[in-house]
Amino acid sequence: MTEEEARNWVREQFGVSRETQLSHFADILVAGASEQNLIAASTLGELWARHLVDSAQLIPLAVEAKGLWLDIGSGAGLPGLVVAVLTDRPVMLVEPRARRVEFLRAAADQLGLADRVEVIGSKVESCRPKQPAAVISARAVAELGKLFAGAQHCTDSSTVWVLPKGRNAQSEVEAARRTWQGAFHVEPSITSPDSGIVVAKRVRPR
């Protein structure tokens, strides 16, 4: 997917005004990346395809789940801030690193999203949302079993997990099934055809 194709995809899926707002976030991200290692410098030329659309493609996979979107290990706001820009959902960003927390709070404020984006400066194990998350995402954080164990207290039986997992998606599902049960399937990534996104529902320990 080229940068032009990525921007066109966002425009078609979410509209021109959302694309414009996402472009604002892209500028914030590039500026922040010059001050701390938010994303690999080698990927800045592919920002829309490699990071923004790679995050945005999670939204249609959980469109039926209404309510709080909880993003674990938000880092540069991928996918959490992208979700907040492209939807009207309440979003909780969980990030233990202090400088990333500062960046996320400043970015949410600059984007006019501070009223529905909450940034929690801790690991997810210490996070206590006021209501169960409707959706949980985590991009390049931990293997499935650890994610389920760490965030289970933030969920209920209707929570949808959308978890980009690269080439190891299917093998991670098979490993997680030894100790976790639920409905699991792997969606192909639109930005990288050999990568997969694990979509999981009704996740509970065996």
Image (cartoon, rainbow, N blue to C red):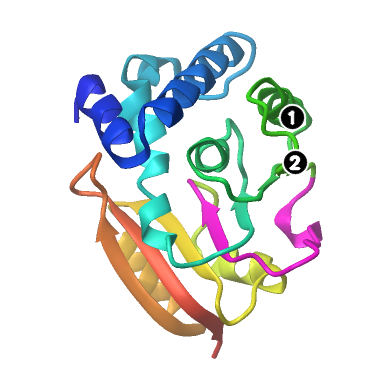
Amino acid type assigned to the residue bearing label 1 in the image: Arg
- Residue range in magenta is 122-139
Percent coordinates x, y for residue 80 in the rendering: 56, 42
CB atoms of marks 1 and 2 within 8 Å: yes
Q: Pick the quarter of the image with the N terminus.
A: top left
Residue 149 lies, in percent from the top left, at 63, 71
Residue ID for mark 2: 119
Image quarter for residue 68? bottom right
Query: At which x and y percent is residue 51?
Result: 40, 32
**In terms of secondary structure, where does tag 1 sit?**
helix
- Is 63 in front, or is 93? 63
For disc 1, the marked residue is 105
Q: Is residue 15 left or right of residue 33?
A: left
Identify residue type, mark 2: Val
Q: Crowdedness of circle 2 by 10 Å Cα count: few (<14), some, many (20+)?
A: many
In front: 86, or 163?
86
- Compute the Cα span from label 1 to label 2: 6 Å
